Image (cartoon, rainbow, N blue to C red):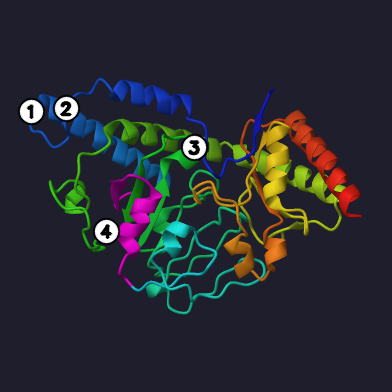
Amino acid sequence: MNRVYLDWNATTPLRPEARAAMIEAMDVIGNPSSVHAEGRAAKMLMERSRERIAASLGAEGADVIFTSGATEAAAMMLAGQGIQCAPVEHEAVKAWCDLSLPVDGGGIISVSDPTRAAVQLANSETGVIQTLPEGLAVSDLTQAFGKIPFAFNWLGVMAGFVSAHKLGGPKGIGALILKKGTDIEVRLRGGGQEQGRRAGTENLIGIAGFAAAAEVAQRDLEAGLWDEVAARRDKLEARLTGIAPDAIIVGKDNKRLPNTICLLTSGWKGETQVMQMDLAGFAVSAGSACSSGKIRASGTLQAMGFDDAQAQSAIRISISPGLDDDQINRFADAWESAYSRWRERNG
């Protein structure tokens, strides 16, 4: 079966450039904290990678602290800080926040005190993009990085975090980005790595892959690849809503990531759709991937005002550059076939 991957927001294939950089880094034997020649070579590779990632993020001059991923970075910044967020945030953020920020039916978050708030730049399930208030304490930049243009230094936020595997880098590496002079509570103590903010020998192979992926992702963005993705997304949305006129494209009236469709077909469980599409050769999801394989009603959609039955009836289709019209049409055909069978059974 020639499968088609439509779950780009969950994770992305490793870019060839990242793979090559990681293989090359495997031959760098030194520990970046060692002072001998081998250690200095490792340190140089790490610092050059840090500069490349900062440049891709528009974060020149900011502190880029390497972590195991966005989840760890979120915990480093948020745990015990009394930060407010909305219930549409990723679980890694909600775990540490007071879920008191209101969100409207289009997924837009309202903030009263930015200095005590965390607001995502883009939502992983709906693709809805936020306008971040000046002076915001923290922003989850994970889904936006590499898909829409932004610069950390222009966002007006104190801290943000990203994960490499969302843009073609390896899993298990991410970064916390801090405006210069921002203090955080150190949680991993030991050798004093990462400017004393996160102890432990750095994942040099992952860092090298992250830097290569970030540069290529930024180049793709500047070349207009994601504009092409947005055009294909719009074609697919038109096809799907033509098949099912009662279906809802969540967040359609707001700015969204160019690749993301959150499709709600009330009464037809997202879990069922995911399995049917999987058997037909298409990978889609029923929400965020970070739920240990569980499929349940979307808390994001519930927070936006959808009832439980509606929230259980959504799927997320997140497409990628390189996907062609034939693959899009094949998916729409498979979904239409499954939809027709469901309608026949349910009147």
Query: Which x, y percent locates residue 245?
Result: 86, 55
Q: Is residue 116 left or right of residue 181?
A: right
Q: Distance from label 1 to label 3 (Cα)? A: 34 Å
Q: Is residue 288 left or right of residue 49?
A: right
Which kind of residue does numbered mark 3 sit on? Ala
Residue, disc 1: 36
> Looking at the image, which is closer to me, 125 or 184?
125
Q: Is label 4 in a helix, a strand or a loop? A: loop
Which kind of residue does numbered mark 2 sit on? Gly
Residue, disc 4: 180
Which residues are drawn in magenta? 58-81
Q: Quadrant of the C terminus?
A: bottom right
Q: Does the magenta-highlighted stretch encompass residue 25?
A: no
Residue, disc 3: 217
Kindly check if marks 2 and 1 are in contact, taking CB atoms under 8 A apart as contact: yes
Q: Distance from label 2 to label 3 (Cα)? A: 28 Å
Q: Is label 2 in a helix, a strand or a loop? A: loop
Q: Distance from label 4 to label 1 (Cα)? A: 29 Å
Query: Which x, y percent locates residue 115?
Result: 37, 73
Which kind of residue does numbered mark 1 sit on? His
Between marks 2 and 3 in the image, the one whose residue lies nearer the viewer: 2
Residue, disc 2: 30
Q: Does the magenta-highlighted stretch encompass residue 78?
A: yes
Q: Residue at x 44, y 26 (%)?
A: 17
